Image (cartoon, grey):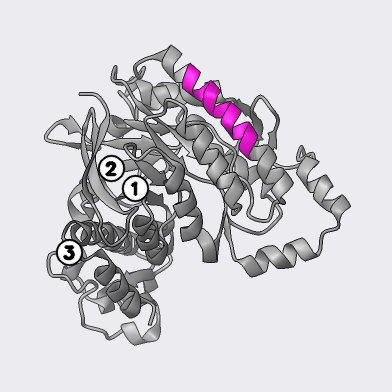
Amino acid sequence: MSFSFEITHNSKEAPLARSGVIHTPHGDIQTPAFITVGTKATVKALTAEQIRDAVGAQAVLANTYHLYLEPGDEIVAKHGGFPKMMNWQKDGKVLPSVTDSGGFQVFSLGQALGHGVSKIATSEEISAYESTLSKREEKEIAQESIHEKMAHIDEDGVTFKSVIDGSKHRFTPERSMQIQHNLGADIFFAFDECTSPLAPITYQKEAMDRTHRWAKRSLDEHKRLGVSAATGEMQALFGVVQGGAYEELRRESAKILGAMDFDGYGIGGSFTKDDMATAVRWVCEELPVGKPRHLLGIGEPLDMLLAIENGIDTFDCVAPTRIGRNGTLYTLDGRINITNAKYKDDMSPVSEDATWYTHGYTKSYLSHLFRADEMLAATLASIHNLKFLTALVDDARKALQEGRFMEFKNSFIARYYK
């Protein structure tokens, strides 16, 4: 079965919002959908069966950078791809999967290193940072040599040091494609450069143009390679839209990549926190309507709902498991820290919904597990948080199909952020 995408419902309330089905060689993904992140072909503390049955995930995303370093993409290929290696299957059949390109690691280890920011910053942070820069400093940042950092970007690719042992490695668009063919995901991404939200527009433009050149090289190499070396199936390649928080750059990037022969599109790079939904709208207004759109690395409930409203089909984010391992849980009334003293004697269930796996455990018990430093604590908290975001997007999809998305969105936001 080849890759395709069909739109089944268009929202009358929000013109860009839609639901649909992504058809892959290993099954369908009902959209909008939250994609669970299993960075190293594992979701920390969870088995594949728990991801499938307790979380209800439709697909899993793994990280190219980390699997290349450990255990190595050739070993993954010998398993028949990362989904088969991690037993991401049902009834003996592999389920849908995704890999990223390694571009975000270029960002986090290179251009953004030392800025102390993530891919999202508030407008106040950006303004404060820009106010400290002279024109000379802006030019230096745009052209700065980052050889002292763990990643150095040039026109051909990126040279980086392993986070494991400090050894030197090299990614180019062609190498990223070769690695991802070995990893065997149904959907994978062109190699891109993700910039810091604090980078000036001159550097954002430079990185965006380079990303477009890398996109063409990624596409050419993908076509040259043909089917996945691991699975023997043809994979779907998504281009990645860049441009930071600048409308003219975002629209330009979407138009240029939209004219290329990609199977779908990722929206990556840095955002202004308070205008992220607007940036998503700019992009989705320019991208081809009939191809799926994935928002990379976004998992805040409000951001996800606003992104669905503005045309996004799928998401991924490590946040639910990362904060879960530290005792933070999503609830309909906002986040809670289960290690707080008030939960020590709380006999209410971890989840309100009786159909959820974590409904069978009390908050008191989960609090005890964290206090006792038991491994099961991370497992239960991760299941709960992943289920929360998966169910949120599933419910949003149902509401969209029933013509009540805006009511659902506003009701959720009013309670969660009260």
Is residue 139 visible in the rendered image? The answer is yes
Label 1, label 3: how far apart the Cα atoms are: 22 Å
Mark 1 surroundings within 10 Å by alpha-carbon count, few (fewer than 14), some (14 through 19), many (20 or more):
many
Q: Element at badge 1?
A: strand
Q: Amino acid at mark 2?
A: Ala
Dominant secondary structure (helix, strand or loop) of the stretch shown in magenta:
helix
- Viewer-nearest residue: 349 or 222: 222
Mark linked to residue 314: 1
- Viewer-nearest residue: 273 or 182: 273
Query: Residue 50 vs residue 202: left or right?
Result: left
Q: Earlier in the sequence, mark 2 or mark 3?
A: 2
Q: Element at badge 2?
A: loop
Q: Element at badge 3?
A: loop
Residue at left 76%, top 40%? 146
Mark linked to residue 59: 2
Quarter of image, res 252? top right
Q: Earlier in the sequence, mark 1 or mark 3?
A: 1
Q: Can residue 407 be found in the magenta stretch?
A: no
Q: Amino acid at mark 1?
A: Thr
Q: Which residue is mark 3?
A: 356
Label 2, label 3: how far apart the Cα atoms are: 19 Å
Residue at left 32%, top 55%? 15
Looking at the rendered image, the quarter that the C terminus falls into is bottom left
The residue range painted magenta reads 208-220
Q: Do residues under tags 2 and 1 come within 8 Å of each other at their CB atoms?
A: yes
Q: Amino acid at mark 3?
A: Trp
Q: Is residue 187 above or below residue 344?
A: above
Is residue 70 visible in the rendered image? The answer is no
- Residue found farthest to the right: 136
Spot occupied by residue 205 in the image (x, y as percentages of width and height): 67, 42
Spot occupied by residue 129 in the image (x, y as percentages of width and height): 74, 63
